[in-house]
Amino acid sequence: MNTAAMEREIYVNTGGGYKVTVGAGLIDRCGELLRPVLTGDTVMLITDTSVAPLYLKRATSSLTNAGFRVVPYVIPAGETSKNMAVITSLLELFANSGLTRSDAVVSLGGGVVGDTAGFAAGVYMRGVAFVQIPTTLLASVDASVGGKTGVDLSAGKNLAGVFHQPKAVLCDVLCLDTLPSEVFADGVAEVIKTGILSGEELFSHCESRIDKSDNIISIIEKCVIYKAKIVEEDERDSGRRKLLNLGHTVGHAIERLSGYTTSHGYAVARGIAVISRAAAALGQLGATELDRIISALEANSLPTTTEYTATELAAAATSDKKRKGGTLTLVMPRGIGDCVLIDYPVDELEGIFSLGLGGESTSAGTSTGAL
Ligand code: GLY
């Protein structure tokens, strides 16, 4: 494959504006790619125990060759690292390493590393430059773009954080080769979500199994283009950006109920299935579209059922930070490329989720208008 010819650049016009580069072999070129973007000489290179043995040495050597002083730091892999204690350790490290306002933090890893390093970069000295080098499909298509950073609190996921847009995102698709298949599938759930939101051009790729073959660059590009457009319209998540939460209200509830042993993508896949079945039962989504969504999830070996009851899901969902007063905004699919935000009274959720699990509901369906 002629990888240089396949390299793609997407410009995201938020914050100071930044470029997302998608291509093969970018880790070995990260120093030269970042030199024109970063003003300082020191880079805090944050990664985790899964990624460090694979890519830390290569990223460090590329950055060093480009003239950066690199301070590496490795956090334990996994969602449990997304906590305030890790943020404190990072901030102390930045200060003890002499990180100045003109220097930068670079995250090398999946969503957990990006969210955590990004939060620390966003609050250190009231914000220093930040770069994302995502190494998972999930981080490439969603988490690394758009500036959401943060950590979990015991009350729920991502409850503490800041919006801090990166200066650059480098998606090296060669990293996908080392991903276990279930971690790759985790990212495919977000691709399918974006396909349902954006329309046929992307969704049609999701109807057969997505693999790590040549067209992955184009699939990531399509996801990033869609996300960039939404984020440019609503950087602060007060309107249209909430569409990106398709499947996430139930998904986050499942993650929480499982004590975060269910991964984000697998939980979101279940959430997409539940909310799509509910939308069909409420007459909002046609049977053919529902079948296509469920088949796309199945074609990619993603789960479409959950062991949790509607009561459990509703209770867990109402502690989600996106709840607004007595209502909660759900993303309801009406077709491929046609999803809407609807505010539902919190006491209707159990009925809606019950419909999504294949049960009957007596209380769902009296929703207020679409946002
Ligand atoms: N991951 C959803 C968002 O960035 O808004």
Image: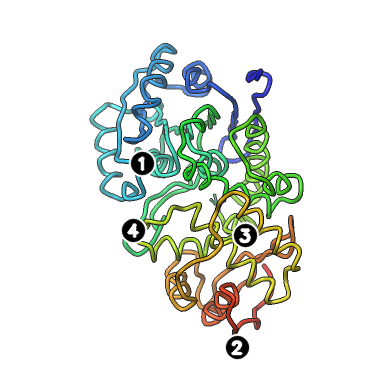
How packed mark 3 is, by other alpha carbons closer than 10 Å (few <14, some 14-19, many 20 or more), is few
Q: Find the distance from the CA under tag 4 to the CA under tag 3.
A: 24 Å
Question: The disc labelled 1 sits on which kind of residue?
Answer: Ala
In the rendered view, would you say 123 is above or below 249?
Answer: above
Residue 239 is marked as 3
Mark 3 or mark 4, which is nearer the start of the sequence?
Answer: 4
Mark 2 or 1: in front is 2
Location of residue 42 by image quarter: top left
Position in image of residue 277 (x %, y %): 64, 69
Q: Residue at x 68, y 54 (%)?
A: 197
Residue under pointer 2: 362
Q: Find the distance from the CA under tag 2 to the CA under tag 1.
A: 46 Å
Residue under pointer 4: 153
Question: The disc labelled 4 sits on which kind of residue?
Answer: Leu
Mark 1 or mark 2, which is nearer the start of the sequence?
Answer: 1
In the drawing, does residue 274 fall left or right of residue 50? Answer: right
Residue under pointer 1: 120
Q: Residue at x 60, y 41 (%)?
A: 14
In the rendered view, would you say 279 is above or below 2?
Answer: below
- Of 233 and 182, which appears nearest the observer? 182
Q: Find the distance from the CA under tag 3 to the CA under tag 1.
A: 26 Å
Position in image of residue 110 (x %, y %): 44, 39
Callout 2–callout 1 Cβ contact below 8 Å: no
- Of 364 and 45, which appears nearest the observer? 364
